[in-house]
Image (tube, grey):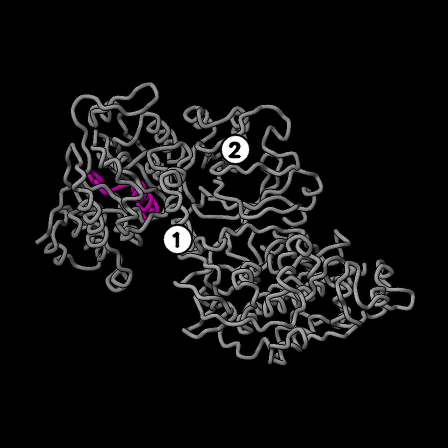
Amino acid sequence: MIFRFIPWKTEVFHSTNRTYTILFNKFIDNYYNRYNKNRVKQLGCQRCCAEWLIRCAAIFRVSGSSEFVSSKRQLLQLSEPFEIEEVDCSDSCISTPGLDHFQGVNTIKTLRLSYCSWMNDDSLYKVAFHLKDCLNAIEIVDCGCISGAGLLYLQNMTKLRNIMIRDLPMVTPGERIIVIDTLKTKLDKTCKITYPLERWLHSSELAFDGSCNPTKAHGTAKTCLFPPLTICNGHGEALSMKNLNVTDVSEAADDLSLSAIANDGMELPHCLNSCPVGMANISIRKMYEQNPKMYEQYIRKQESTRPGEDRPPSAHFITPQQALKFCQNSLVPYEEREIVKYKKIYYLGEDAQKCSTLDSLNNYGNDDANGFYRIVKADHIAYRYEVIRLLGRGSFGQVVKAFDHRKRTFVALKIIRNQQPFHRQVCSEVNILSLLCRMDEENKSNTVRMIDHFTFRNHKCIIFELLSISLYDVLRLSKYRGINLKVVRRFAFDILQCLDFLKRYGIIHCDLKPENIVLRQSDRTGVRVIDFGSSCVKGSRLYSYIQSRFYRAPEVILGCVYSTPIDMWSFGCILVELFTGNPLFPGVDEKDQMALIIETLGVPPPKLINGRRGSIFFDQDGLPKYCRNMNCSHKGKERGPPGSRSLRDVLKRCDNGDFIDFVSKCLALDPEERMTPRAALKHSWIRTKQSSSPSQQRKATVEPSDPKPSTDQSNSNTKSTTDRRRNNGQENAEILLPIPSGQRCGNGIAKNNTSITFRENGNILAESAAGPSSGRLKLPFL
């Protein structure tokens, strides 16, 4: 017996029905609209789609037949293979999750969606995405949860020749005009679009004032007792009851919003406002205003559950003319002149606190006195990207986390300072990043991927994939106690693949350091190398003085000609720091930096001493000047004679001779004798116990552990050295990581003493000593 479901409708939504509403929606999504990939593979797309339609009380007609199939008995009588040609979902309980059954069913020509109370904007997106190459006619009638934002997805359906729309109470007259204009522009000229305004007004029994806001008119409009509270696709938003119902509802019903859903334990939707004109759906700012903590929790959850997921481009945009006509209140005077330069408008930042001046001072108020772009939360960049928060700031400019409303994904957006020297520098960076993309189409070089670049308000902007935390942040989470050598080897392998790729094409990174090596995901050990702002191609060097001080090669300090070996020097310094937790050469200034190198590795060869800047550090006899006063260097730091401190002394708690040999070859003073990336990949330390493929990424979690005393006494620098690196050793970067002690870190609380544990197949690969804590914490995203 088939259960024929007809949605309940009522005028007043009582607070006592709240629990039943949530449970009923779960039942609709998880039972009637469940989607099983294994069953689809077993039975085929057509059969599973037919079973789903019958289960949800919809009917369909197969090719070559004039009768509709409406029961399970009729379905069993169909001879396979069959092709579904027409679907009538009137009065059915189909919802967004079930529409995945349309995937692979490319034979449906006609689709009727009448009185489908669970259909929403996400539902139309899935319909448009799965049936875009086959559907010829669609009818949408009295689906109370569909807004103008959802109707715009129909413009992707290039085969449509007949569209019938009426009785949609959530679509305002202004949105109706935008929808009709957009569909007529994007679809074929032969497509017939029927969307009567008068019938829509009388059917929903609404009247509109001059501001296009709905007001109750005569009678009672139809409302849905069980509206969809879960939007699973990731393109729409959680709608409060107030927005879903067009009639008067009780105060208790109005209160059923995001917090009520979250408290019930339901999964928060992947919600980001893709509607630039502020249509019916709540924007991301609304979620933030209702509950900031829930917003942050939701953002972390979405990042961790959908890392790097490719989504089809959004068709949801308007033209500049439509924006000026219908959204002028969201534009400041400067934007009214600027917007006409853009063909497609995806996002306007209507809720941002924008600068409304027309004074040309400081780039019309968009810059500060130093040429930095003024970052405004929820504002737009190029009418496409929504500013979420600031990730980092340096001398070059700023990096923000943004949401791409066209591709519906998070990105990292680098905004360069509005000054001429930085404009020239970013041109070189873009050229190198473009070269990397062309030479590495399969994305196997472990270099950051540039997605796009453009100029916005005189600022050069570069769009990157959004990655996780840097290796320096991993060290900071471990309280600078170092990482297990097995995990260091994992990191080293990925970095060497990058350096080998760069050397192959003659590219010098020039700023390799832990801050510029970033985890791809917060719970895996795969890394990417970022920040090619100082990079150059071999033979066309832009700068004579490069690299952060702690990782600066001796040939750079002494003013000699440099090439790709300087990156191997930085790489060797990074490996030691990852293992010990402290920088290998934490010089307080450049003279002290050179003294530390000489103290550990001895006097450089004469060809380096004779460099352009060699006289600053050595006398005429080739003796280091700091040795005249053996007890202290330039700023009073005690430094021993040349070679008095060996790498074995620094790595005294390391019992792996291969690792010590590997590092010593990376830190050869003579660049010509320094190990190359290709040779390093063949070294026994890298090849030993490298059981899994290089591309495989390992799980990494932060777990509590018992207190263990720190045994690393090999470096004479105290914690003040580590704190000082921000001001003295890392001039070019400032990372803002929002995980202070006692605050949220991933899905838990970052205690004062937290340990990091890397695991693979249940085996502990790395564990840092830490104090007692409780709970299981994942490494947080930036």
Label 2 sits on a secondary structure element that is loop
Compared with 198, 138 (above or below) is below
The 10 Å Cα crowd at callout 1, few under 14, some 14 to 19, many 20 or more, is: some
In percent of width and height, residue 479 lies at 54, 63
- Which residue is labeled 1 in the image? 301
Q: Is residue 130 magenta?
A: yes
Can you tell which quarter of the image residue 648 is in?
A: bottom right
Magenta residues span: 111-136
Counting residues from the start of the chain, the first of labels 2 and 1 encountered is 1
In percent of width and height, residue 175 lies at 34, 29
Compared with 724, 676 (above or below) is below
Between 266 and 244, the residue placed more toward the observer is 266
Please say whether residue 83 is visible from this viewpoint: no
Q: Is residue 722 left or right of residue 312?
A: right
Circles 2 and 1 in contact, beta carbons < 8 Å: no
User: In which quadrant of the rendered image does the N terminus lie?
Assistant: bottom left
The 10 Å Cα crowd at callout 2, few under 14, some 14 to 19, many 20 or more, is: few
Q: Which mark is residue 106?
A: none
Label 1 sits on a secondary structure element that is helix
Compared with 702, 14 (above or below) is above
Q: Amino acid at mark 1?
A: Lys
Q: Amino acid at mark 2?
A: Tyr
Q: Is residue 279 magenta?
A: no
Between 720 and 309, the residue placed more toward the observer is 720
Tally of numbered discs: 2
- Which residue is labeled 2 in the image? 342
Q: CA distance from mark 2 to mark 1?
A: 33 Å
